Image: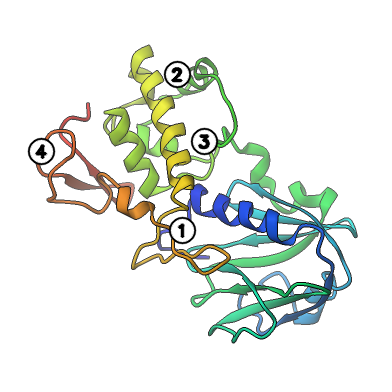
Amino acid sequence: MSTGPVYELPEVETVRHDLEREIVGKKIKSAEATSMRCLSRYRTRRSFTDQLEKAKITSVKRVGLYIIIDLDNDLALVVALGSTGSLRRNANKNPKLARTELVVTFTQYGQLRYVDPDATGELFVVASESLQDELPEIARYGYDPTKPLAWTEFARSLLQRKVKLKKLITDDTFVVGIRNIYADEILFKAGLRHDRVSNTLSSQEIRRLHRSLVGTIHDAMKYRGVSLPEREFCDPFGSAGNYGDHLEVWGRVGELSPRSRTPIKRVKFGGSWTYYCDTQV
């Protein structure tokens, strides 16, 4: 899996939402894996693709940063996109992109392809009832910001911990699917420093953090995620996400903060650059 900046919740949810409209109800005619690069759980390509053929897609879900494509044979295709994986909806006649790792052909209406230039993602099939056995970490997942949660419940969970805020909101056991980019944006909008300890927040600050977290994630989904030179993101139709145009601090060191008109700063935190403004407390 990738050691670089992975896709975060808004990118993965954009893919899930598009695929839900595009492929649910489709029957798989054939499936072809072109290499073993993203099939680390298998010894042969056929042992993977045989589980997909002749099955009908019944739903497309997201659990954390995994995309789960449910099939009518009581199996599910699990996709982890990593930092370079891309699920693409194509007509059969469309030329294949380099490093197309999987081609799923439907009995009607084209194909679904998985493209991964750096092989940072993973594909595998599990029995639907065994999903949690294969991915035990999902049992520990915390709050998903695409789903409703009262700020009081959010506050209760937050105040039980004594953790620096950026570490906390990038911890999947607290809130799922957030990494460096969105953590910095959330904390900027909330006016809180990355190294502020969670159990020191006032009720007003917790409200701001909750509102910023939900608002940032939903705004990012509206603009269909962030695509960066070091982590290009395309939706299933090949269009890049454009929330990068709306980032206020991440990657903008030296530019003037939209809040204070003083230069945005950066510091190493947890092994990665963190971007912030002096107005954050």
Q: Is residue 116 visible?
A: yes
Q: What crowding class fits label 3: few (fewer than 14 Cα within 10 Å), some (14-19), or many (20 or more)? A: some
Q: What whole-number distance in Å separates the C-alpha atoms at marks 2 and 4?
A: 32 Å
- The residue indicated by pointer 4 is 261
Q: What whole-number distance in Å separates the C-alpha atoms at marks 3 and 2?
A: 14 Å
Query: Disc 2 vs disc 4: which is toward the camera?
Result: 4
Query: Disc 3 vs disc 2: which is toward the camera?
Result: 3
Q: Are marks 3 and 4 in contact (CB under 8 Å)?
A: no
Quarter of the image for residue 43 reads bottom right
* Type of the residue with mark 1: Val
Q: What whole-number distance in Å separates the C-alpha atoms at marks 4 and 1?
A: 30 Å
Measured along the vertical axis of the image, is residue 105 above or below residue 259? Answer: below
Q: Is residue 44 visible?
A: no
Helix, strand or loop status at disc 1: loop
Q: What crowding class fits label 4: few (fewer than 14 Cα within 10 Å), some (14-19), or many (20 or more)? A: few
Quarter of the image for residue 167 reads top left
- Disc number at residue 159? 2
Q: What whole-number distance in Å separates the C-alpha atoms at marks 1 and 3?
A: 16 Å
- Of 133 and 62, nearer the camera is 62
* Type of the residue with mark 3: Val
* Type of the residue with mark 4: Arg
